[in-house]
Amino acid sequence: MKKGLFILIPLLLMGYLIVITLIPRPKPQMVDAGNKILYNQNLESNNRDQESKNQNVSSDHIKQSLNCKSCHACEYPTKEDPCLIECPRQDLALVFNTTKEGPEVVVIDEMSENYSGVVFSHKLHTHMSEMSAGCTDCHHYNTTGPVLKCSKCHENTRSREDVSVPDLKAAYHRQCMKCHVQWSRENGCNTQCHSRKSPDSDVKLQQLIKEVTNKTHPLRPEPTKMRWETNYEKGKIVTFFHDEHVQLFKLKCADCHSNDNCTKCHESKTSKDFGKTIQIKKSEEEHHKSCSSCHNINSCQKCHKESEMMPFNHGRSTGWNLKAYHSKLACTKCHGNTVPIKKLDNNCTSCHKNFTLGQFDHKITGLVLSEGHAEAECNSCHVNNNFAKNPECSSCHDKDKSYPADLPGKRGK
Amino acid sequence: MKNLNRRNFLKTAAAAGLAISALDSKTVKGADKTLSEDRIGMLIDTANCVGCRHCEWACRVAHNLPTNDLDTYSNTEVFKEYRRPDSHSLTVINEFENEKNPLLPIHVKTQCMHCERPACVSACIVGAFTKHPDGTVTWDTDKCIGCRYCMVACQFQIPTFDYDKAIDPQIRKCDLCFDRRKSGKVPACVDICPNEAIIYGKRSDLLKIAKDRIKRKPDVYIKHIYGEYEVGGTSVLYIAGKNFTELKMPPLGTNPAPGISESIQHGVFAYFVPPVTLYALLGLIMWITKRGKVDELKENNDIQEDEKGENS
């Protein structure tokens, strides 16, 4: 009997331990509410801190309607451990910083053996990038939040295991040479970037930093409307609304300006008319390319008109005036992310699947239905569920009732 | 000549041929087995090459060849003429027009391709050339007799010769910095390239990288990895935005050059089985014909004897 107890008690203890470890404990749940990521109580206070400290990030998260997994590898990223996905982050460039935040001058001297550090005028380049693809032009594959150092992904050694990502030396050179080879028509070690190490190189470096700090590029204000005169007979004028594409359609700069460099506006560094912007002659194909990546260019007269086009107006172009709630939404909310955009009809229930009897509160339309009417099916007044047309009373009432003379309830909210 | 008529002779000859060809395929496969799965190579991404020619300088320094100062290599005048590697420059860069963007010309580096089935190794009559399991093709200067067969055999016209030297001229070509790599370094050209347009790594990895780049930037690259299948595959691979024939890369088939000649040569002498079989066969034929003759003679003798008997 005693022997039996000696075996039973440890067995029971072990069983208890196993049960404790195996029972699933409630995990903190993440709720996606209108793209605003909310955490349950355990994380909420933490999250609120983060939001107040880092307004930029949270607001960008809302704007972008991002999939969490496109940036974060783990289930519950925190500010301390955002667990950003491993390099290379293919096709993921989400820098949301303004050009004013960056440093004025950066001295790149992480690898200098034979040469003194490279003085890079960050300010000057941000000025130029503002007319082009913005920060993402150089800071590619960067997730939201602080701009990462190049060395985060690019190892500082040529002899390494994973050669699919260029090393640090190559990463820097490619970024610079992408434009500078075309700009200066040189491919040797540019003396402006690299100067050989000498006893007085520190003094020279300081001088260069001073010189570069004051360099700026005149800003060209962001265009609102652009107008081209073309040779097309049936419609000579093409109008392009830059502001609409940025603000209304929410295109990222890099969507159109991904391959821009100095030569887009200036002929060359060596040419005499440096300083003057010049008109680059582009082929017909190239001219159309920037539009055709999103728009269907099969019908010429859609863009080529006799006169200037009017700015985009949802009501005028589609016959559906956006009011109240709809005007605040991003286009993609209803029309999706596809190109060309998904076309919709003006039937409320084709988007709002929950507009059914009992689920829809008629009060928000500004008309409180009387008791009898509140129990009626939607389509008994709104024929064929067409909410754009005036409601009809004839399905229940005789011809003595009509809308809007006889309201089925009270006005007011 | 009872048993051996023309038809039988052809039959035996065909059988012998089959036996030889069966042996051939074995020897060819055996040659492939010496290559390591992790064999190395270089991927030359012409879209990233800016034509700084630093690799030319680094190559000369690494191989103790005479060179000017590095700064003199920025001179782009040399691009006016198409250049080939010579005994003093084992690698050269050439410039080609880029129709997509005239401001960014295409630069193509030329050096030994380190073929998977090298023709030079096959052609060398003294066995001075070696294909190493890691993919490198090197040669032994002490064994070389200067016959220059390798130069004729190479489809890429890579091995060069010290024509200017009267005494002790040597064959030279890129050896993928064989000695440098022994101390854990990467080849000199790979090391100095500012843009890492030359990627050094496992051939299998390089193929993956090349395919990935072509897939990700279809407007930059054409769908062709030069060296993936050319002449049975090479250790050096190229990707570019223009047809390779326009970049003066020879349009070559997928068959390794040493294929036919080597298989006959190796097949004929493999383990001395075919020669022994051939001689055995000839011996057998001789024996059969001889026996037949003896029989004939005997018969003749018998007949003669019979005739004699009858006469007598």
Image (cartoon, coloured by chain):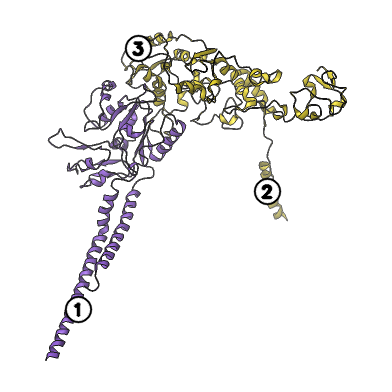
Chain colours: A yellow, B purple
Residue denoted by label 3: A271
- The alpha-carbon separation of the residues under discs 2 and 1 comes to 100 Å
Q: Earlier in the sequence, mark 3 or mark 2?
A: 2
- Is disc 2 on the same chain as disc 3? yes
Q: Amino acid at mark 2?
A: Pro
Residue denoted by label 1: B295
Q: Position of residue A215 (x, y in %)?
A: 42, 9
Residue denoted by label 2: A10
Q: Position of residue A303 (x, y in %)?
A: 54, 19
Q: Amino acid at mark 1?
A: Asp
- The alpha-carbon separation of the residues under discs 3 and 1 comes to 102 Å
In front here: B273 or B216?
Answer: B216
Q: Dot 1 falls on which chain?
A: B
- Tell me if residue A364 comes above or below residue A124 in the rendering: below
Q: Amino acid at mark 3?
A: Ser
- Is disc 1 on the same chain as disc 2? no
In front here: A344 or B136?
Answer: A344
